[in-house]
Amino acid sequence: MNLLPVQNKRSKDPGDSKAMVQARAEFLRAGYYQPLAAKLAEVALDQGGEPQTLLDAGCGEGYYLRELLAQAEQRQQQLICAALDISKWAVQAAAKQAPRVTWLVASNNHIPLPTASLDTLLCVFGFPVAHEFRRVLKPNGRLIMVDPANHHLLELKQIIYPQVHSKPEQLPVPADTWQLTDQQRLTFTISLTQPEHIQQLLTMTPHLYRASSEGRARAAALTHIDVTVDVWIRTFVSAD
Ligand SMILES: C[S@@+](CC[C@H](N)C(=O)[O-])C[C@H]1O[C@@H](n2cnc3c(N)ncnc32)[C@H](O)[C@@H]1O
Protein backbone atom coordinates (compact mmCIF):
# COMPACT_ATOMS: atom_id res chain seq x y z
CA MET A 1 0.00 0.00 0.00
CA ASN A 2 1.47 3.38 -0.96
CA LEU A 3 0.81 5.92 1.80
CA LEU A 4 3.46 8.42 0.84
CA PRO A 5 1.74 11.72 0.00
CA VAL A 6 3.21 13.46 -3.05
CA GLN A 7 3.90 16.59 -0.99
CA ASN A 8 6.09 14.54 1.40
CA LYS A 9 8.33 13.29 -1.39
CA ARG A 10 11.61 15.14 -1.72
CA SER A 11 12.33 13.28 -4.92
CA LYS A 12 10.25 11.49 -7.55
CA ASP A 13 11.81 8.17 -6.56
CA PRO A 14 12.68 8.49 -2.85
CA GLY A 15 14.77 6.02 -0.88
CA ASP A 16 16.83 3.20 -2.30
CA SER A 17 16.78 2.84 -6.08
CA LYS A 18 15.69 -0.30 -7.91
CA ALA A 19 19.38 -1.17 -8.50
CA MET A 20 20.25 -0.80 -4.80
CA VAL A 21 17.27 -2.91 -3.76
CA GLN A 22 18.17 -5.64 -6.27
CA ALA A 23 21.81 -5.65 -5.17
CA ARG A 24 20.83 -5.90 -1.50
CA ALA A 25 18.29 -8.65 -2.19
CA GLU A 26 20.84 -10.76 -4.06
CA PHE A 27 23.63 -10.17 -1.54
CA LEU A 28 21.40 -11.03 1.42
CA ARG A 29 20.00 -14.08 -0.38
CA ALA A 30 23.58 -15.43 -0.51
CA GLY A 31 23.40 -15.64 3.31
CA TYR A 32 26.34 -13.44 4.33
CA TYR A 33 24.33 -11.54 6.97
CA GLN A 34 22.46 -14.58 8.29
CA PRO A 35 24.23 -14.45 11.71
CA LEU A 36 22.97 -10.88 12.10
CA ALA A 37 19.43 -11.77 11.05
CA ALA A 38 19.39 -14.68 13.51
CA LYS A 39 20.74 -12.57 16.40
CA LEU A 40 18.30 -9.74 15.73
CA ALA A 41 15.38 -12.18 15.65
CA GLU A 42 16.57 -13.68 18.95
CA VAL A 43 16.76 -10.24 20.61
CA ALA A 44 13.32 -9.25 19.32
CA LEU A 45 11.63 -12.53 20.26
CA ASP A 46 13.37 -13.20 23.62
CA GLN A 47 12.42 -9.90 25.18
CA GLY A 48 8.97 -9.37 23.72
CA GLY A 49 5.55 -10.44 25.02
CA GLU A 50 2.88 -12.18 22.99
CA PRO A 51 1.20 -11.49 20.66
CA GLN A 52 3.70 -8.81 19.79
CA THR A 53 2.87 -5.91 17.47
CA LEU A 54 5.98 -5.03 15.51
CA LEU A 55 6.99 -2.55 12.83
CA ASP A 56 10.14 -2.74 10.70
CA ALA A 57 10.78 0.92 9.82
CA GLY A 58 12.99 1.18 6.74
CA CYS A 59 12.56 -2.52 6.01
CA GLY A 60 14.36 -2.65 2.65
CA GLU A 61 13.40 -5.83 0.84
CA GLY A 62 12.33 -7.45 4.10
CA TYR A 63 15.19 -9.87 4.74
CA TYR A 64 15.41 -9.36 8.52
CA LEU A 65 11.66 -9.47 9.01
CA ARG A 66 11.37 -12.74 7.09
CA GLU A 67 14.04 -14.30 9.34
CA LEU A 68 12.22 -13.00 12.41
CA LEU A 69 8.90 -14.44 11.21
CA ALA A 70 10.54 -17.80 10.51
CA GLN A 71 12.02 -17.91 14.03
CA ALA A 72 8.70 -16.83 15.56
CA GLU A 73 6.96 -19.66 13.73
CA GLN A 74 9.50 -22.18 15.03
CA ARG A 75 8.91 -20.93 18.57
CA GLN A 76 5.14 -20.74 17.97
CA GLN A 77 5.25 -17.07 18.99
CA GLN A 78 2.55 -14.83 17.57
CA LEU A 79 3.51 -11.63 15.80
CA ILE A 80 1.39 -8.97 14.15
CA CYS A 81 3.75 -7.31 11.71
CA ALA A 82 3.89 -4.23 9.55
CA ALA A 83 6.85 -2.90 7.64
CA LEU A 84 7.46 0.32 5.80
CA ASP A 85 10.03 1.81 3.49
CA ILE A 86 10.12 5.05 1.57
CA SER A 87 11.34 3.14 -1.51
CA LYS A 88 8.52 1.63 -3.55
CA TRP A 89 11.06 -0.77 -5.09
CA ALA A 90 11.99 -2.14 -1.68
CA VAL A 91 8.37 -2.60 -0.62
CA GLN A 92 7.42 -4.26 -3.92
CA ALA A 93 10.27 -6.74 -3.54
CA ALA A 94 9.40 -7.40 0.11
CA ALA A 95 5.66 -7.85 -0.40
CA LYS A 96 6.21 -10.62 -2.95
CA GLN A 97 8.06 -12.72 -0.39
CA ALA A 98 5.99 -12.41 2.81
CA PRO A 99 2.32 -11.72 2.17
CA ARG A 100 1.31 -12.01 5.86
CA VAL A 101 2.97 -8.68 6.68
CA THR A 102 1.29 -5.29 6.09
CA TRP A 103 3.79 -3.68 3.71
CA LEU A 104 3.63 0.09 3.37
CA VAL A 105 5.38 2.63 1.16
CA ALA A 106 5.68 5.38 3.75
CA SER A 107 8.22 7.50 5.59
CA ASN A 108 9.60 7.26 9.11
CA ASN A 109 8.69 10.95 9.33
CA HIS A 110 4.95 10.15 9.15
CA ILE A 111 4.32 6.58 10.22
CA PRO A 112 0.77 5.66 9.17
CA LEU A 113 -0.02 3.82 12.43
CA PRO A 114 -1.91 4.93 15.55
CA THR A 115 -0.18 6.44 18.58
CA ALA A 116 0.96 3.87 21.19
CA SER A 117 0.18 0.89 18.97
CA LEU A 118 3.49 -0.99 18.85
CA ASP A 119 5.37 -3.28 21.22
CA THR A 120 8.52 -3.31 19.09
CA LEU A 121 9.97 -1.10 16.41
CA LEU A 122 12.95 -2.28 14.37
CA CYS A 123 15.27 0.16 12.64
CA VAL A 124 18.00 -1.80 10.85
CA PHE A 125 20.73 0.27 9.16
CA GLY A 126 17.94 2.84 8.91
CA PHE A 127 17.06 6.45 9.48
CA PRO A 128 15.52 6.93 12.92
CA VAL A 129 12.99 9.70 13.51
CA ALA A 130 13.07 9.70 17.30
CA HIS A 131 9.88 11.66 18.08
CA GLU A 132 7.79 9.68 15.57
CA PHE A 133 9.16 6.38 16.88
CA ARG A 134 8.17 7.48 20.41
CA ARG A 135 4.67 8.34 19.23
CA VAL A 136 3.89 4.94 17.72
CA LEU A 137 5.47 2.82 20.50
CA LYS A 138 3.44 1.78 23.54
CA PRO A 139 4.77 3.29 26.82
CA ASN A 140 6.96 0.23 27.50
CA GLY A 141 7.57 -0.45 23.83
CA ARG A 142 11.07 -1.23 22.59
CA LEU A 143 13.08 0.33 19.84
CA ILE A 144 15.63 -2.17 18.49
CA MET A 145 18.29 -0.68 16.26
CA VAL A 146 21.10 -2.17 14.21
CA ASP A 147 23.91 0.22 13.36
CA PRO A 148 27.45 -0.14 12.04
CA ALA A 149 30.22 -0.32 14.65
CA ASN A 150 33.72 0.97 14.02
CA HIS A 151 35.13 -1.92 12.01
CA HIS A 152 32.08 -2.51 9.83
CA LEU A 153 33.18 -3.28 6.25
CA LEU A 154 36.64 -1.93 7.13
CA GLU A 155 38.56 -3.93 4.50
CA LEU A 156 36.24 -2.74 1.73
CA LYS A 157 36.57 0.86 2.93
CA GLN A 158 40.37 0.49 2.91
CA ILE A 159 40.15 -0.45 -0.78
CA ILE A 160 37.79 2.32 -1.91
CA TYR A 161 38.99 5.29 0.19
CA PRO A 162 42.53 6.73 0.29
CA GLN A 163 42.22 6.96 4.11
CA VAL A 164 39.75 5.51 6.57
CA HIS A 165 39.02 7.68 9.60
CA SER A 166 37.65 6.09 12.74
CA LYS A 167 34.68 8.12 13.99
CA PRO A 168 33.73 8.34 17.68
CA GLU A 169 30.87 5.94 18.40
CA GLN A 170 27.58 7.72 19.10
CA LEU A 171 24.17 6.45 20.14
CA PRO A 172 21.73 6.66 17.22
CA VAL A 173 18.92 8.31 19.25
CA PRO A 174 19.13 11.09 21.88
CA ALA A 175 20.11 9.83 25.35
CA ASP A 176 17.79 12.32 27.11
CA THR A 177 14.66 10.78 25.57
CA TRP A 178 15.73 7.14 25.06
CA GLN A 179 17.12 4.79 27.68
CA LEU A 180 19.53 2.14 26.42
CA THR A 181 18.46 -1.17 28.02
CA ASP A 182 20.61 -3.65 26.12
CA GLN A 183 23.47 -3.55 23.65
CA GLN A 184 25.29 -6.35 21.94
CA ARG A 185 28.15 -6.07 19.50
CA LEU A 186 28.21 -8.70 16.80
CA THR A 187 31.42 -9.11 14.82
CA PHE A 188 32.17 -11.73 12.21
CA THR A 189 34.10 -12.10 8.95
CA ILE A 190 32.59 -12.85 5.58
CA SER A 191 34.65 -14.17 2.72
CA LEU A 192 33.52 -12.81 -0.64
CA THR A 193 34.91 -14.91 -3.46
CA GLN A 194 32.60 -13.82 -6.26
CA PRO A 195 33.15 -10.39 -7.84
CA GLU A 196 29.38 -9.87 -8.23
CA HIS A 197 28.91 -10.23 -4.46
CA ILE A 198 31.59 -7.59 -3.85
CA GLN A 199 29.80 -5.26 -6.26
CA GLN A 200 26.43 -5.97 -4.66
CA LEU A 201 27.81 -5.16 -1.21
CA LEU A 202 29.17 -1.87 -2.51
CA THR A 203 25.95 -1.04 -4.35
CA MET A 204 23.74 -1.63 -1.31
CA THR A 205 25.70 0.82 0.88
CA PRO A 206 26.20 4.61 0.76
CA HIS A 207 29.86 3.92 -0.06
CA LEU A 208 28.90 3.53 -3.72
CA TYR A 209 28.18 7.28 -3.89
CA ARG A 210 30.83 8.39 -1.41
CA ALA A 211 33.73 6.62 -3.13
CA SER A 212 35.63 8.26 -5.98
CA SER A 213 35.56 6.67 -9.43
CA GLU A 214 39.13 5.40 -8.74
CA GLY A 215 37.93 3.81 -5.51
CA ARG A 216 35.02 2.13 -7.26
CA ALA A 217 37.38 0.90 -9.99
CA ARG A 218 39.68 -0.66 -7.35
CA ALA A 219 36.66 -2.49 -5.88
CA ALA A 220 35.55 -3.59 -9.36
CA ALA A 221 38.96 -5.19 -9.93
CA LEU A 222 38.76 -7.37 -6.80
CA THR A 223 38.22 -11.09 -7.21
CA HIS A 224 37.96 -11.88 -3.51
CA ILE A 225 38.06 -10.11 -0.17
CA ASP A 226 37.51 -10.98 3.49
CA VAL A 227 35.34 -8.31 5.10
CA THR A 228 34.50 -7.67 8.75
CA VAL A 229 30.86 -7.26 9.65
CA ASP A 230 30.76 -5.27 12.90
CA VAL A 231 27.42 -4.01 14.21
CA TRP A 232 25.64 -2.87 17.34
CA ILE A 233 22.25 -4.32 18.18
CA ARG A 234 20.77 -1.93 20.71
CA THR A 235 17.48 -1.88 22.56
CA PHE A 236 15.98 1.38 23.84
CA VAL A 237 12.85 2.31 25.73
CA SER A 238 11.39 5.76 26.06
CA ALA A 239 13.13 7.57 28.94
CA ASP A 240 9.94 9.10 30.44
C1 LIG B 1 20.56 0.85 4.34
S1 LIG B 1 18.92 0.46 3.82
C2 LIG B 1 18.45 -0.77 5.02
C3 LIG B 1 17.30 -1.63 4.58
C4 LIG B 1 16.98 -2.81 5.50
N1 LIG B 1 16.64 -2.39 6.84
C5 LIG B 1 18.15 -3.76 5.51
O1 LIG B 1 19.02 -3.60 6.40
O2 LIG B 1 18.22 -4.66 4.66
C6 LIG B 1 18.00 1.88 4.37
C7 LIG B 1 16.55 1.83 3.93
O3 LIG B 1 15.86 2.98 4.45
C8 LIG B 1 14.98 3.47 3.47
N2 LIG B 1 14.67 4.87 3.83
C9 LIG B 1 15.40 5.99 3.59
N3 LIG B 1 14.79 7.07 4.12
C10 LIG B 1 13.65 6.62 4.71
C11 LIG B 1 12.58 7.25 5.42
N4 LIG B 1 12.57 8.56 5.63
N5 LIG B 1 11.57 6.49 5.87
C12 LIG B 1 11.57 5.15 5.66
N6 LIG B 1 12.54 4.50 4.99
C13 LIG B 1 13.57 5.22 4.53
C14 LIG B 1 15.70 3.24 2.16
O4 LIG B 1 14.82 3.23 1.06
C15 LIG B 1 16.35 1.89 2.42
O5 LIG B 1 15.53 0.81 2.02
Image: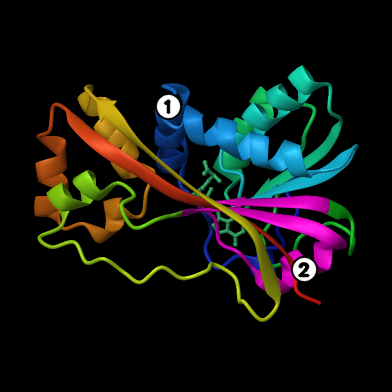
**Figure check: 197 above or below 127:** above
Residue 134's disc is 2
Residue 104 showing in the rendered view: no
The answer to which quarter of the image holds residue 239 is bottom right
- Judge whether 167 appears above or below 39 on screen: below
The verdict on residue 48 being magenta is no
Q: Earlier in the sequence, mark 1 or mark 2?
A: 1
Residue 39 pos. (x, y %) = 57, 36
Quadrant location, the C terminus:
bottom right
Q: Which residue lies at the image location 49% right of the left edge and 30% below the top edge? A: 35
Q: Give the residues in magenta.
A: 119-147
- Confirm or deny contact between disc 1 and disc 2 (CB under 8 A): no
Residue type, mark 1 in image: Glu
Report if the beta carbon of the residue with label 2 is closer than 8 angstroms to ligand 1.
Answer: no
Q: Amino acid at mark 2?
A: Arg
Question: Would you say residue 141 is visible in this rendering?
Answer: yes
Number of the label disc, if any, that sits on residue 26: 1
